[in-house]
Amino acid sequence: MGTPRAAVRPPKRLGNYEVLREIGQGGMGVVYLARQPALTRMAVLKRMRPELQADPSIVERFEREARAAAAVHHQNVVAVYDCFVSRGGHYIAQEFVDGRDLSSVLTKLRRIDPDIAALIALEMVRGLEGIHAEGIIHRDIKPANVLVGSSGEVKIADFGIAQEGRAPGLTRPGTMLGSVPYMSPEQMQGERVDYRTDLFSFGIVLYEMVVGYPPFRESSEDSTDTLLERIQFERFVSPRRAVRKVPRWMARLIRHCLRARPGRRPPSATALRRTLERHLGRVSAADCRREIAEYLWNEEVFELSERRTAVKRKPVRRGVPRWVPATAACAVGACLLAMQFTAGRGAGNPEVVAAEPASTAVVSPTPLSEANDTNGDAVPSIEPVVAARPWVTPTLLVPAEIVLDSSVIAPPVPAGALLLVARPWAEVVVDDRWKVTTPRAAPLRIPAGRHRVVFHHPTYGIYEAEVELAAGEQVTLAHSFGEGGR
């Protein structure tokens, strides 16, 4: 057995970038994680393999990837910063996405909940819409080329075999380029392709997200037909037959994308986006990111690191609509407001005077003064904060002198638990009402609903976030200011 080759240490500096470490290798070359000091941002450097640089067509394809990606300015497409030559090597510098590719997500989860898969699909289609708007065909849409960040962002990457839709490109007729089994039939036969070949590949990726495997797989030894024949004759198991949770509209959309003849597929990424939005509602990109991140953190796809901020949720019981706690809270507030107004009029005073809350109608967190912090000292009681911002609505309190009929009072708003983590430490204010100092071992019990959280550090500054808490749920909200961060 031969001696294993020693790992090649990456150079410390390439052009304007400081190389931190190697993070992977692909068919074209090596990938490094780097930092650009001038702009204080992270980047990814893709280096072409030295043995491939002797082929001018491969060098041209490598540079064309940079040009194609740099032409697209879209939040769902990985941005390219630079293309340069350093120490005899060809490099592409591009955006760093702190997360995982969709292939590794599927490896961990096997399949994704259809509701979340639909949001990922919507973000993918938005990216394809931006790519096609620049006259570019990606031609290699597959899970490995879809990056999902820890904040829920979805970005299409790797334009290595992309071509302009109106140009002949570098591919000769009869040449097959792409990734099996994500290729369209015209792509497998080396025919000329257009934008609809990306929509075919998109349909395969969506199928794999909700079912757990692609609709068309390599032929086995006992197969009577080939992979191309199955694609041409549209022979695949319906996604609803494989997984009953898949909605009917999604199954129809997948079948529409997987038509063998391009003319029978959706005419454009824009048409596909409109179809998704018709079923999902006009969900914003921010809402997509929030829901995707929440799901993936909940499924433990990501792990909390020192330089990452995330909302990590415990699983919520399915079958209980998420609007129920909010509706109950609104009902309680309306009931109490009506009783306050009536009591004020009866006493000859039309104004509702805020007073100490009655013990039977307090809607406030339960102090956890019995808990200990990480140093073993008693945790101080929660310090109320006076609302100093005009847009903050104070919690409705019932005056103590009003006697309420217990048969009329609705039960208190259900509470949840919020665990606050900050590195290195912080003073944390929740809804301008409660203040704690981390590290704090015990979670903060507060009413269910949406809350505004502000982390403050005297050196690193302020970070603000919003968190939604369901009844009986514990949520961990963590933030790292980072070295020198503000």
Image (cartoon, rainbow, N blue to C red):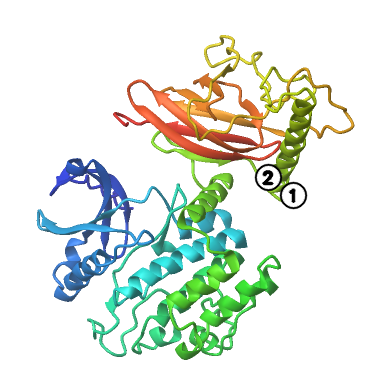
Q: Amino acid at mark 1?
A: Val
Q: Where 407 falls versus 153 (above or below)?
A: above
Q: Do we see residue 92 in this rendering?
A: no
State yes or no: discs 2 and 1 in contact (Cβ < 8 Å). Answer: yes
What mark, if any, has residue 437 been given in the picture? none
Q: Secondary structure at mark 1?
A: loop
Q: Position of residue 467 (x, y in %)?
A: 55, 39
Q: Residue at x 59, y 36 (%)?
A: 475
Residue extending furthest toward the right:
407
**Crowd tier of the residue under label 2, counting other residues whose Cα lies within 10 Å: few below 14, some 14–19, many 20 or above:** some
**Tag nearer the camera, 2 or 1:** 1
Q: Residue at x 17, y 42 (%)?
A: 38
Q: Number of marks in the image?
A: 2
Q: Which residue is mark 2?
A: 316
Q: Residue at x 29, y 69 (%)?
A: 160
Q: Position of residue 16 (x, y in %)?
A: 14, 47
What mark, if any, has residue 320 been given in the picture? 1
Q: Secondary structure at mark 2?
A: loop
Q: Where 160 falls versus 80 (above or below)?
A: below
Q: Where 462 falls versus 74 (above or below)?
A: above
Residue extending furthest toward the left:
87
Q: Position of residue 57 (x, y in %)?
A: 18, 76
Quarter of the image for residue 262 reads bottom left
Q: Name the side, left or right, on which 446 lies relative to 157.
A: right
Q: CA distance from mark 2 to mark 1?
A: 9 Å
Camera-side residue: 230 or 203? 203
Q: Amino acid at mark 2?
A: Val
